[in-house]
RNA sequence: GGUCGCGUAGCUCAGCUGGAUAGAGCAUCUGCCUUCUAAGCAGACGGUCGAAGGUUCGAAUCCUUCCGCGAUCACCA
């Protein structure tokens, strides 16, 4: 039995003995740093069952625990708080049990617990920007967190490869491109397509201005601009399967995919299954028919099909147009079903999509539930806040974006500058150095984004570079590298020994306590779909380690048992850093 | 206007199912490299937890109202 359960039982027994009443629950919490003790029993809630002075009650229980629980050898009572000092032997024993467990804190995958995590899902008319980076990092790490907490996970994305937006880039390329290709221009292929998306917008705006000068109203001008009409015509041709349009579409999408793949590789994200909207945009219509029969949907006089969600406090929502064509919702219903058809073992899905679609997913999940799918109970919209710039929202078509590739590049550059100034890489080849700069730069970027609660929006100021000190990715990597340095120098086989010194150093005890929190943090992060919880945990652990490192000699310790324990503690901290960072999608270096 | 989210130190953020004097990092200022990597450590400075009520022995945390910011309320995706 673990110590908290044991304490709970013992407290209940102690109370029963002294006061002849049963307390249903016992509140335990870690003792605050400014008080002596490791675990605290909060007495206040017991006052409902026991009449009396909390200090007296605490003292009675404290005495009882000291006498009956071997692990407790001291206590003190402050107001209604009973602080218990736990013996070193307990902590040492506990550490010994997890010491060689390479999968400490990670739950083995359960084949009955299968989720699909969708993330990324970009449009194919422009390169990825900082907002996409947040989506990718969140989706990837939540998928990894779910794996670490015992789920089997499929990562997927649905590529938005059709629609008016891609036609805009295509049309502009056709009109203004003069046959420009990634090869001829030397521009990264997805950026080239993005260039024409911007070009379209520019031409469109110009036409609007001209029409307005001719006396048309703004909204009319926006609807009647010739270039927009042309783009709409192109979309119609695409849907009709026009050969020339389809060929152009394939060519330009191909460019985008090539570019995206480079960015994905740089970011270190991957997918098990890709869906393309050009394949899925007609899905879902048959389900609507089905839903009509079941009475989930109803048909209006004009023939369009709706669902009434007013009982749920929402509006009526259209699921099929009067002309029988699909809307976004139809498609999402169909795609969800398609996924389960493709992967029959999944029993839930996570959608990583920005919070501007909160309403859409609320409705989608309700519909799927009403349609009665068994997997509809485990649907989660991993909603996250936008990444804004000091100047406001990022807009690709206006060119006011922080480009993903540029940002990754500039992070590596900063890492390089700092690393050269530090000058600790003697003996590293140029290739190893480049790899390290990228690793550190990416860590700074990824941690910067992941440490923030997904719900909150992020304000990113390109002028103020991302930090490399303090609560940052590089700081944690640095600690890892330090630990590896110690392990390289340890002149004995760490995995073979176990330390049993008489008294634990305060810092050693604190480290062990921090290590104990790892498994529950992984589970908590999974429950909350929040990489931020894990990021903040690892920061706490690393701070604790650095304090230990600075105050306690490790390799210089004369007492061999103490030295061995300290090396092992360091090793375990290193392993937990590595596991956590792997889950967050961040690599760790041997040196830096 | 309805709905949802957010509001904690100058800045960026933690604070789990209510618990002790609200915590970190950055910035500013002090110390610490002849000893395991100073991208570090130790310390100082900095707060009416948006406001007001309420519930409670106890509220940053729960409830209500209000204020501010954002999103959404498309036969766009």
Image: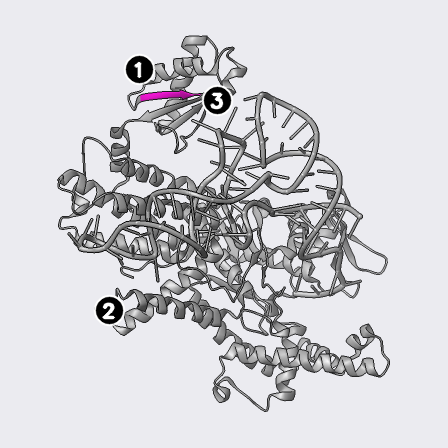
- Asked whether the beta carbons under mark 3 and mark 1 sit within 8 Å of each other, the answer is no
Q: Is residue A552 above or below residue A194?
A: above
How far is disc 2 from disc 1 in space, using C-alphas?
Answer: 58 Å
Residue A428 numbered tag: 2
In the image, taking residue A22 as reference, residue A399 lies left or right, namely right
Instruction: Report the magenta stretch's main SS.
Output: strand
Quick one: SS at disc 2?
A: loop
Q: Is residue A492 visible?
A: yes
Dot in front, 3 or 2: 2
From which residue to which does the magenta span run? A74-78
Q: Which residue corresponds to mark 3?
A: A25
Q: Chain of mark 3?
A: A
**Residue drawn 38% across and 23% down?**
A7
Task: Provide residue A425's location: percent of width, then percent of height.
Answer: 25, 66
Mark toward the start of the polypeptide (3 vs 2) = 3
- Asked whether the beta carbons under mark 3 and mark 2 sit within 8 Å of each other, the answer is no
Task: Provide residue A525's location: percent of width, then percent of height.
Answer: 47, 45
Task: Provide residue A342's location: percent of width, then percent of height.
Answer: 52, 58
How far is disc 3 from disc 1 in space, using C-alphas?
Answer: 21 Å
Instruction: Mark 3: give few (<14), some (14-19) or many (20+) Cα within 10 Å.
Output: few
Q: Chain of mark 2?
A: A
Question: Is residue A73 highlighted in magenta?
Answer: no
């Amino acid at each position: 039995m673990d110590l908290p359960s044991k304490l709970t039982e013992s407290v209940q027994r102690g109370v029963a003995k002294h006061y002849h009443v049963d307390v249903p629950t016992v509140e335990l919490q870690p003792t605050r740093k400014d008080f002596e003790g490791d675990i605290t029993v909060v007495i206040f809630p017991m006052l409902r069952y026991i009449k009396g002075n909390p200090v007296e009650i605490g003292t009675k229980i404290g005495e009882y625990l000291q006498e009956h629980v071997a692990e407790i050898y001291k206590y003190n009572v402050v107001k209604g708080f009973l602080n218990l000092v736990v013996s070193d032997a307990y902590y040492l024993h506990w550490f010994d049990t997890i010491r060689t467990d390479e999968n400490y804190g990670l739950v083995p995958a359960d084949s009955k617990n299968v989720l699909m995590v969708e993330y990324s899902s970009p449009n194919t008319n422009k390169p990825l920007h900082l907002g996409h980076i947040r989506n990718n990092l969140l989706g990837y790490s939540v998928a990894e967190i779910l794996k670490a907490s015992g789920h089997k996970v499929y990562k997927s994305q649905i590529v938005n490869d059709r629609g008016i937006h891609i036609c805009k880039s295509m049309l502009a390329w056709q009109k203004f491109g003069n046959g420009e290709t990634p090869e001829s221009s030397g521009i990264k292929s997805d950026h080239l397509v993005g260039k024409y998306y911007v070009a379209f917008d520019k031409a469109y705006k110009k036409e609007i201005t001209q029409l307005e000068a001719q006396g048309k109203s703004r909204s009319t001008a926006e609807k009647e601009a010739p270039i927009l009409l042309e783009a709409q015509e192109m979309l119609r041709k695409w849907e009709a399967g026009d050969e020339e349009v389809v060929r152009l579409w394939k060519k330009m999408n191909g460019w985008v995919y090539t570019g995206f793949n480079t960015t994905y590789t740089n970011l270190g994200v991957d997918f098990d299954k890709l869906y393309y909207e050009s394949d899925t945009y007609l899905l879902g219509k048959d389900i609507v028919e089905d839903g009509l029969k079941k009475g989930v949907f109803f048909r209006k006089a004009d023939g369009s099909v709706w669902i009434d969600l007013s009982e749920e406090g929402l509006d009526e929502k259209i699921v099929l147009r009067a002309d029988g064509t699909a809307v976004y919702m139809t498609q999402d219903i169909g795609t969800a079903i398609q996924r389960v058809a493709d992967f029959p073992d999944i029993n839930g899905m996570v959608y990583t999509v920005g919070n501007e679609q909160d309403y859409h997913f609320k409705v989608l999940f309700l519909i799927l539930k009403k349609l009665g799918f068994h997997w509809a109970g485990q649907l989660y919209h991993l909603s996250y806040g936008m990444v804004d710039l000091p100047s406001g929202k990022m807009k690709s078509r206006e060119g006011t974006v922080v480009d993903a590739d540029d940002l990754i590049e500039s992070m590596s550059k900063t890492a390089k500058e700092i690393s050269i100034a530090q000058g600790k890489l003697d003996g590293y080849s140029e290739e190893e150095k480049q790899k390290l700069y990228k690793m550190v730069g990416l860590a700074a970027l990824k941690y910067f984004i992941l440490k923030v609660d997904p719900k909150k929006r992020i304000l990113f100021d390109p002028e103020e570079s991302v930090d490399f000190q303090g609560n940052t990715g590089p700081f944690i990597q640095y600690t890892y590298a330090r630990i590896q340095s110690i392990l390289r120098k340890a002149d004995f086989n760490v995995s073979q020994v176990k330390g049993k010194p008489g008294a634990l150093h305060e810092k050693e005890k604190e480290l062990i306590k921090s290590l104990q929190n790892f498994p529950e943090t992984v589970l908590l992060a999974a429950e909350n779909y929040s990489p931020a919880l894990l990021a903040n945990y690892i920061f706490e652990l690393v701070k604790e380690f650095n304090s230990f490192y600075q105050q306690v000699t490790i390799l210089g310790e004369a007492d061999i048992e103490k030295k061995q324990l300290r090396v092992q503690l360091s090793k375990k901290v290193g392993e937990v850093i590595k596991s956590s960072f792997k889950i967050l999608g961040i690599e760790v270096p041997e040196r830096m």
